[in-house]
Image (tube, grey):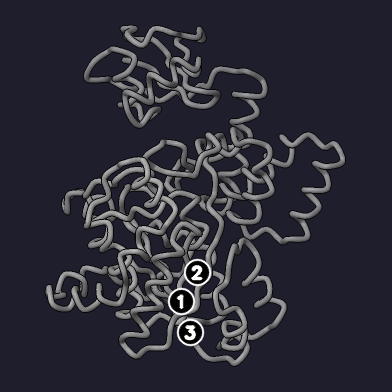
């Protein structure tokens, strides 16, 4: 049954929404009771779906709860090609084997948010891998080169003399053709995807389909204040342990608390408004942030896990106690950079060096500055306030 409650529809189209293209048409369709096909695509460029990517998945869930047919598209083909929408430099192509490995648990992770049993799941290699050179050229003819190079990040790269590959021009065609193959009525995506989403409308027109309406969501900042990205190591992942997820949320900048409540949870907006007023009236933001951490852990794990994670956080970080269940690692090399990378505290040796330079790493409760430090068995390494590992 399709739910057509106007109040619910209004919140659907406003909560955590940056832009709606063809808003009047979407409202009309939603109120009409017609079942719509709602598309969201995700490229498996990392093994983890993070909370930033969960924002459009939550919106997909909202449509599903209204009774519409949601379509989850895993970009196994486009993941190899690489989307340059939010990149300041050329994104390298990924090996097909790496993409297959990355997406092994994507459907399971998405299932933490949406009802997979009542959802269409597609992989875009189903149709993109079958297109002929002639068909691709016909699709490319729908667009001009100026359409592509006028995009802010591409124009900036060209102005700076940076390389822009012809491959990057093809990505919007692929995402656009996905909408044709799926016959999408509405597509959801981040604001950085606007050009690609609009490409879907143009190709649907070419193929005599009604152009999809578009709903974009704001991008969510990660732990360091930049856009959340697995490659930057600043993400809160859906597969994080309850303790890690709780601790990561508690490390967020205070000015992100309300934004996270709105985008990353489905806590009632009236309650979120009360939280915002509490902070404005002098309540310690840490207290409200604990409610946010509890909400996220409860959603992705359980309320029991959230209570235990909260207790762990209070005992370990508020009371400054050393954790009693520190994980161990037997590294391939005992230098500090190897330990930080192999313990997954830092995504790369370069990032590990920066963590040390910024005095974010401690060994046996002492800040270190030497990135060539060699550890020994029994040493306890700490990154930030919440990550510990014992070398064995």
Where is 301 relative to 138, above or below?
A: above
Pointer 2 with pointer 1, Cβ within 8 A: yes
- Label 3: few (<14), some (14–19) or many (≥20) C-alpha neighbours in 10 Å: many
- Distance of label 3 from label 2 (alpha carbons): 12 Å
Q: Regarding mark 3 in the picture, which secondary structure is present there?
A: loop
Quarter of image, res 159:
top left
Which residue corresponds to mark 1? 38
Specify which label sits upstream in the sequence, 3 or 2. 3
Where is 280 relative to 83, above or below?
A: above
Q: Position of residue 80 (x, y in %)?
A: 22, 55
Which residue corresponds to mark 3? 36
Quadrant showing the C terminus = top left
- Distance of label 2 from label 1 (alpha carbons): 7 Å
Q: Regarding mark 1 in the picture, which secondary structure is present there?
A: strand
Where is 96 relative to 316, above or below?
A: below
Q: Position of residue 334 (x, y in %)?
A: 27, 13
Residue shown at 37% from the left, 48% from the top: 48
Left or right position of 125 against 201: left
Specify which label sits upstream in the sequence, 2 or 1. 1
- Label 2: few (<14), some (14–19) or many (≥20) C-alpha neighbours in 10 Å: many
Residue shown at 53% from the left, 22% from the top: 323
- Distance of label 1 from label 3 (alpha carbons): 6 Å
Q: Position of residue 14 (x, y in %)?
A: 65, 68
Left or right position of 307 against 59: right
Which residue corresponds to mark 2? 60
63 or 189: which is nearer to us?
Answer: 189
């Amino acid at each position: 049954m399709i739910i057509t409650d106007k109040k619910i529809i209004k919140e659907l189209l406003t909560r955590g929404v940056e832009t709606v293209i063809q808003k009047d048409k979407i409202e009309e369709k939603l109120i009409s009771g017609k079942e719509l096909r709602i598309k969201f695509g995700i490229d498996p460029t990392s093994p983890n779906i993070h909370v930033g990517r969960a924002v459009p998945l939550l919106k997909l869930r909202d449509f599903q709860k209204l009774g519409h047919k949601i379509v989850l598209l895993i970009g196994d083909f486009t993941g190899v090609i690489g989307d340059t929408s939010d990149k300041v430099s050329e994104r390298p192509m990924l090996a097909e084997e790496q993409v297959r490995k990355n997406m092994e648990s994507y459907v399971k992770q998405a299932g933490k948010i949406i009802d997979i049993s009542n959802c269409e799941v597609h992989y875009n290699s189903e149709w993109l891998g079958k297109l002929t050179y002639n068909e691709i050229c016909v699709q490319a003819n729908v667009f001009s080169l100026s359409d592509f190079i006028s995009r802010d990040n591409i124009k900036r790269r060209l102005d700076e003399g940076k390389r822009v590959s012809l491959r990057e021009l093809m990505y919007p065609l692929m995402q656009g053709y996905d909408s044709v193959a799926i016959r999408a009525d509405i597509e959801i995506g981040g604001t950085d995807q606007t050009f690609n989403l609009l490409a879907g409308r143009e190709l649907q027109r070419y193929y005599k389909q009604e152009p999809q309406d578009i709903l974009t969501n704001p991008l969510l900042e990660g732990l360091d204040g930049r856009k959340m990205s697995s490659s930057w190591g600043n993400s809160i992942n859906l597969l994080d342990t309850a303790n890690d997820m709780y601790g990561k949320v508690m490390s967020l900048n205070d000015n992100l608390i309300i934004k996270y409540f709105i985008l990353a949870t489905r806590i009632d907006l009236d309650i979120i408004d009360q939280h915002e007023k509490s902070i404005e009236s002098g309540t310690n933001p840490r207290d409200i942030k604990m409610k946010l951490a509890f909400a996220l852990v409860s959603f992705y794990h359980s309320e029991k896990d959230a209570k235990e994670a909260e207790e762990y956080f209070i005992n370990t970080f508020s009371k400054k106690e050393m954790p009693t269940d520190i994980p161990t690692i037997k590294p391939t090399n005992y230098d500090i950079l190897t330990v930080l990378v192999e313990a997954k505290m830092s995504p790369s040796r370069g990032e590990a060096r920066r963590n040390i330079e910024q005095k974010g790493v401690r060994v046996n409760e002492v800040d270190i500055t030497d990135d060539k430090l060699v550890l020994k068995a029994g040493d306890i390494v700490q990154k930030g306030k919440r990550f510990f590992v014992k070398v064995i």
